[in-house]
């Protein structure tokens, strides 16, 4: 499990450093805050290679709180469990029907759709869709993030990584200007082809 560093500033002037849910350091005087908490927190963040999250909470000005009380005041998006996963059984989009109460339930679902929301934790989100029978040849997995432009690492780019499953990255897509650059993973090739789609010849790329 990746460590989560949260530096909490209370409105009463106390600074508290959490590693995951545990308090590892706290201070109230300016000197202690600068030397023991803030400085140490940033060094720890750099050493571990994880982001330092900072927030301000309105805690008891008399300091009459315990770690669990203070942790409960931290906004949800900053906490260790900020990421959420949800999975739904789904079917072809054209087989959904509605009545006055909303979507009509159906037992005809053929696939499952997974949403892994890690926006607050790492700025990422993952979507995966696969057959209910766990057929890996029907799985498609995409990860969205702010990536680095392969042509200029100093620039950031809206990025999508496409996987055939979690351990098999197929291609990465980078939004660069008014175009999208597709970069195949090692060992993956683009194979141009022409196929007939809805009565018309279409140029396509097979990726694999």
Image (tube, rainbow, N blue to C red):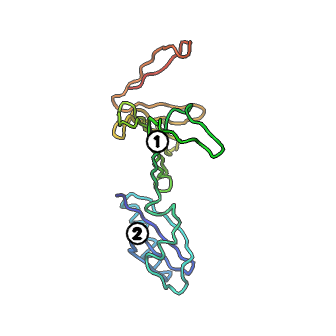
**What kind of element bears circle 2?**
loop
Circle nearer the viewer, 1 or 2: 1
Residue that badge 2 annotates: 21
Nearest the eye: 53 or 128: 128
Count of picture labels: 2
Q: Position of residue 22 (x, y in %)?
A: 38, 72
Q: Is residue 187 above or below residue 66?
A: above
- Circle nearer the N terminus (1, 2): 2
Residue at position x 48%, y 48% in the image: 124
Residue 182 at x, y percent in the picture: 47, 30
Residue at the limit of the structure toward the right, as seen here: 100
Which residue: 49% across, 71% down? 72
Q: Which residue is mark 1?
A: 89
Alpha carbons under labels 1 and 2: distance apart: 33 Å
Residue at image coords 42%, 65% = 5
Q: Quadrant of the N terminus?
A: bottom left
Determine which of the numbered discs, if any, sits on residue 7 in the image: none
Circle 2 residues within 10 Å: few <14, some 14–19, many ≥20: some
Compared with 86, 179 (above or below) is above
User: The C terminus is located in which quarter?
Assistant: top left
* In this picture, residue 72 sits left or right of residue 23: right
Out of 179 and 109, give the one closest to the viewer: 109
Residue 87 spot, x, y in % from top left? 45, 46
Which residue is at 41% across, 70% downward?
40
């Amino acid at each position: 499990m990746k460590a989560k560093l949260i530096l909490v500033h209370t409105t009463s002037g106390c600074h508290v450093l959490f590693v995951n849910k545990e308090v590892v350091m706290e201070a109230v005087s300016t000197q202690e805050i600068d030397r023991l908490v803030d400085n140490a927190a940033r060094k720890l963040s750099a050493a571990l290679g994880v982001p330092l999250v900072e927030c301000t909470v309105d805690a008891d000005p008399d300091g009459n709180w315990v770690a669990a009380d203070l942790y409960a005041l931290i906004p949800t998006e900053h906490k260790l469990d900020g990421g959420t996963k949800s999975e739904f059984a789904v079917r072809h989009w054209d087989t959904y029907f509605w009545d006055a109460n909303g979507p009509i339930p159906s037992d005809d679902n053929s696939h499952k759709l997974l949403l892994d929301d890690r926006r607050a934790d790492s700025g990422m989100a993952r979507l995966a869709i696969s057959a209910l029978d766990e057929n890996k040849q029907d799985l498609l997995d995409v990860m969205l993030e702010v990536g680095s432009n392969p042509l200029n690492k100093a620039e950031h780019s809206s990025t999508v990584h496409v996987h055939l499953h979690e351990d098999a990255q197929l291609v990465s897509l980078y939004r660069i200007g008014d175009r999208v650059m597709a970069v195949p993973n090692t060992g993956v090739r683009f194979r141009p082809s022409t196929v007939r789609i809805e009565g018309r010849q279409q140029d396509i790329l097979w990726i694999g």
